Image: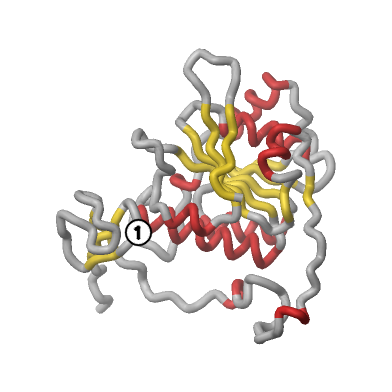
Amino acid sequence: MSKPAKTIYVCSECGAQSPKWAGQCGDCGAWNTLQEGLAASAAKPDSRYAGYAGNDAARIRNLSEVAAAQTERMPTGLDELDRVLGGGLVTGSVVLIGGDPGIGKSTLLVQALALLSAQMPALYVSGEESAEQISLRAQRLGLPTDKLQLLTETCVERIISLVQRHKPRVLVLDSIQTFYTEEMQSAPGSVAQVRESAARLVRFAKQTGTSLFLVGHVTKEGALAGPRVLEHMVDTVLYFEGESGSQFRLIRAIKN
């Protein structure tokens, strides 16, 4: 007989795990942040991600042996977005963009990806909106969509399998709270799912050199939804902000 699933408690602020509930997180000190979940089932390590930081076999080297090549950046076609990114996208980089629901994160990234798709393979993966909704938005903006690829899926394993076949150079996942990995038994949007799904996608981006955008919502406290460790897993953190009724939006680079 299979063993029953083990219950754990995960802090929504820092992602720390505890075998029993407590009013205060023992790691970060936050109050009433421990949420019940199920422990991940034991899984074999995925050999596809071995040594994801590079294609070379892992070995210790002197820093003087490493060639300091100039980083090439891919312009998105949106000048202000490129300026915040430092000139454009870096191969294998992971960008997390957060903002209030409805602020325009999806619109901004559809615009950027439509322009990028004219130069290179680009894929937009939506976990929230239907393909019809995204198509209507692109038509309303008058965007070129002949080469822009679209996928509506929420399972990380299926997404990675499809991406491996189509090999896009730029990938958008909107939004991280809707995706899940089959290795975790908790519901999509939970701390454990957000953290593990993001970790798998980051490993894939680093291994394959795919530039990756992750979309995240901002909570009413003004922080990115999900554990704060998510901000430490990515290369760049952008906040998309704007006043209600204003025609302008502002992008802040919190980390780059």
Question: Label 1, on which residue?
Answer: 15
Local secondary structure at mark 1:
loop
- The three-letter code of the residue at mark 1 reads Gly
Residue in view at x 24 percent, y 66 percent: 18
Q: Residue furthest front?
A: 64
Front-most of residues 61 and 159: 61
Please tell me in which quadrant of the rendered image residue 204 appears.
bottom right
Q: In the figure, 225 relative to 28: above or below?
A: above
| Residue 167 picture location, percent across and down | 73, 57
Quadrant hosting residue 251: top right
Q: Residue at x 72, y 75 (%)?
A: 55
246 vs 58, left or right, is left
Report whether residue 152 is seen.
no
Question: How far across and how far down the image is residue 254, in percent?
Answer: 54, 44
- Residue 13 in percent (x, y) is at 33, 52
In this view, 133 is above or below 56: above
